[in-house]
Amino acid sequence: MKLRVTLAVLALGSAAHAQNYRFPIQLPTSGTQPYPTAYRDLDSGGGLKDWNCGATTYDGHKGSDFGIGSWPVMDAGSRVIVAAADGKVVFVNDGCDDKCSTGSCGCGSGFGNYVKLQHADGKSTYYGHMMKGSLAVALNAEVKCGQALGKVGSSGNSTGPHLHFEVRYASNASDDPFSGSCGGPTSFWVSQGSYKGLPGDQCENPTPPEVDDDKQISESPTGSLSVAPGASFQKTWVIENTGTTTWSTAGGYALAHVGGDLLGATAPVALGASETVAPKAQKTWAVSFVAPSAPGTYGGDFRMNRSGKGAFGATLHLDVVVTEPGSGGASGGGGASGAAGTSGASPGGGGAPSSGGGGKVGSGGTKSGAEPDGSDDVTGGCACGAARDGAPRGLLASAALALFSLARRRRRAA
């Protein structure tokens, strides 16, 4: 016991945190569950003693063994060994026969096909007796807690399919990850579990689950757009990545059309070839559209999409009113609508009618008021009509005087 405590203190002297482990086999959804077959032997003599003062071990055993049930279960390749914590692959061995049943096949220094991981606190973990050809990681690979390393087999010094899990310090001295009445004071498991039960399968520092999400920050132009038939226009949205994933083209992220009218846009709209949008970063999408030729109201919806996982986040709306031909340009982003012709305006071009007749409305304006009757002269724009009661009296007197003078001259001549 003193050796266990001394080793632990030495290991922690150079590390801020001692790494704890999850159960290193992926629990199956059906069939036989893994189970302990042999704990570390803590008796320094010829007896047997495990961490709980029991005898579930064999003489001189240095690790913790977990069985999977039978050869058919192994042959099915249905029991996956996973990393007990984040680490780096510092040794791999493959090629040993995985049908050993004598306990003395010797290949791979007794471990058979195995993987060794180095952890940040200086300790390492060994995963022994794997199936031949099942190793899923390469030398120098960085792995995450729970990542598949290979499959349970019976290679090396083994009597049946099981996993040999062992913890060692940088000095290569091994230690028992379990803590109990006859073991050390500190467990290396995140959750040790009961005697002859299984440790928990939760990682100490689990990787945050992947969350794809976003929110709309702004849009331009805002609201509904009014555009002329066939006109080209653009809508811009600014969105923020509110998830835990980084968007990229390689990751399958794009802006997708999810409903309504596409209006000539190219969809999905891709990110730049090397562009990434990290969590909390913002992305501006500027999308070009072409208005339909038929006047009316149109609308389309767009959302971020991840290939294989579907659309997520805020729905970006496009609302467009295509105006009647000649009624003006775009509004809300393309210019003000043109003014229509105005009824009831003053006559233009020809001026106001004169006081001597009905007058003529100028050729540039729009007529207003009552239609003229037949007594009004509207043909010449001048006062050429017969005099009326309201005409000037001087004109009538001059005409009468001229007739009287003509009559006198004729009488004298006679």
Image (cartoon, grey):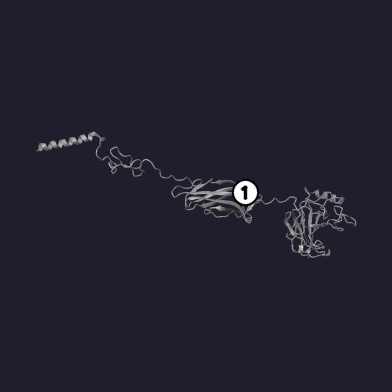
Does residue 79 appear to the left or right of 55 in the view shown? left
From the top left corner, tell me how far across and down residue 223 is, in percent: 53, 45
Q: Is residue 11 visible?
A: yes
Which residue does the numbered mark 1 point to in the structure image? Answer: 214
From the top left corner, tell me how far across and down residue 345 is, in percent: 38, 41
Residue lying at 59% horizontally and 51% vertically, measured from the top left = 303
How many marks are shown on the rendered structure?
1
From the top left corner, tell me how far across and down residue 412 is, in percent: 10, 36
Residue count near mark 1 (Cα–Cα under 10 Å), binned few <14, some 14–19, many ≥20: many
Q: Where is the C terminus found, in terms of image quarters? A: top left
Residue furthest to the left: 414
Q: Dot 1: what SS?
A: strand
Q: Is residue 389 above or below residue 235?
A: above
Q: Nearer the viewer, residue 143 or 187?
A: 187
Q: Amino acid at mark 1?
A: Asp
Q: Nearer the viewer, residue 369 or 264?
A: 369
- Asked which quadrant contains residue 104, the reply is bottom right
Q: Is residue 93 above or below residue 331?
A: below
Residue lying at 80% horizontally and 49% vertically, measured from the top left = 12
From the top left corner, tell me how far across and down residue 115 is, in percent: 77, 59
- Asked which quadrant contains residue 374, the reply is top left
Q: Is residue 139 visible?
A: no
Does residue 350 appear to the left or right of 98 in the view shown? left
Q: Nearer the viewer, residue 300 or 117?
A: 300
Residue furthest to the front: 31
